[in-house]
């Protein structure tokens, strides 16, 4: 069951890399069309500096990639804790639900980006994460027979 618990985390890592490639594949051509030269950019520039410069639809991919570097950083250790402590089939299903909702969130934000749907997907994925975190806490804090 440990490998099954880790598989959703591996899938989300792959999805994050797909979003990174999608970001680059849309951002660099848009920058070229606008004459934005990365080589002549001032030192310390950040992707956020392109908000208002590049079209919003291009930046949406970058914004989503940034989101994938935020909340999922909590998901990864929770999954590892559950894998180490002995997940149940429900944990695995909830973890896959989290990943599916994050992928849907990414696709929505990168293409349509209406806030009510995006927020709903975010809240549903957060509920999955909360359930996983609670179970991880129960398995560790309430573990019996563990030396202190």
Image: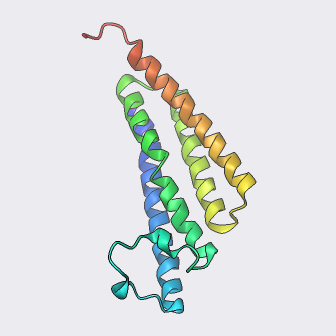
Residue at the image position 75 percent from the left and 52 percent from the top = 116
Observer-nearest of 85 and 127: 127
Classify residue 1 by image quadrant.
top left
Say if residue 55 shows up in the picture. Answer: yes
- Residue 95 in the image, given as x and y percentages of width and height: 52, 38
Observer-nearest of 38 and 74: 38
Say if residue 21 shows up in the picture. Answer: no
- Residue 73 in the image, given as x and y percentages of width and height: 43, 45
Position of 97 relative to 145 (above/below):
below
- Residue 9 in the image, given as x and y percentages of width and height: 43, 45
Residue at the image position 37 percent from the left and 34 percent from the top = 80
How many tags in the picture? 0
Left or right of 53: which side holds 116?
Answer: right
Position of 20 relative to 79 (above/below):
below
Position of 127 relative to 25 (above/below):
above
- Residue 126 in the image, given as x and y percentages of width and height: 59, 39
Q: In what quadrant of the picture does the C terminus appear?
A: top left
Instruction: Point out the residue furthest to the top here.
Output: 145
Instruction: Point out the residue furthest to the left here.
Output: 147
Position of 128 relative to 148 (above/below):
below
Residue at the image position 41 percent from the left and 48 percent from the top = 10
Observer-nearest of 101 and 66: 66
């Amino acid at each position: 069951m440990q490998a099954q618990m880790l598989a959703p985390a591996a899938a989300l890592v792959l999805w994050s890399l797909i979003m990174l490639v999608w970001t680059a594949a849309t951002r660099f051509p848009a920058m070229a069309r606008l004459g934005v030269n990365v080589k002549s950019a001032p030192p310390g520039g950040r992707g956020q500096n392109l908000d208002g410069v590049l079209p919003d639809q291009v930046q949406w991919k970058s914004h989503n990639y940034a989101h994938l570097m935020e909340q999922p950083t909590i998901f990864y250790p929770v999954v590892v804790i559950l894998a180490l402590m002995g997940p149940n089939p429900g944990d695995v299903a909830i973890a896959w639900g989290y990943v599916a909702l994050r992928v849907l969130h990414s696709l929505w934000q990168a293409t349509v980006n209406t806030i009510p749907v995006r927020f709903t997907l975010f809240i549903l994925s957060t509920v999955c994460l909360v359930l996983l975190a609670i179970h991880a806490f129960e398995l560790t804090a309430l573990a019996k027979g563990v030396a202190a």
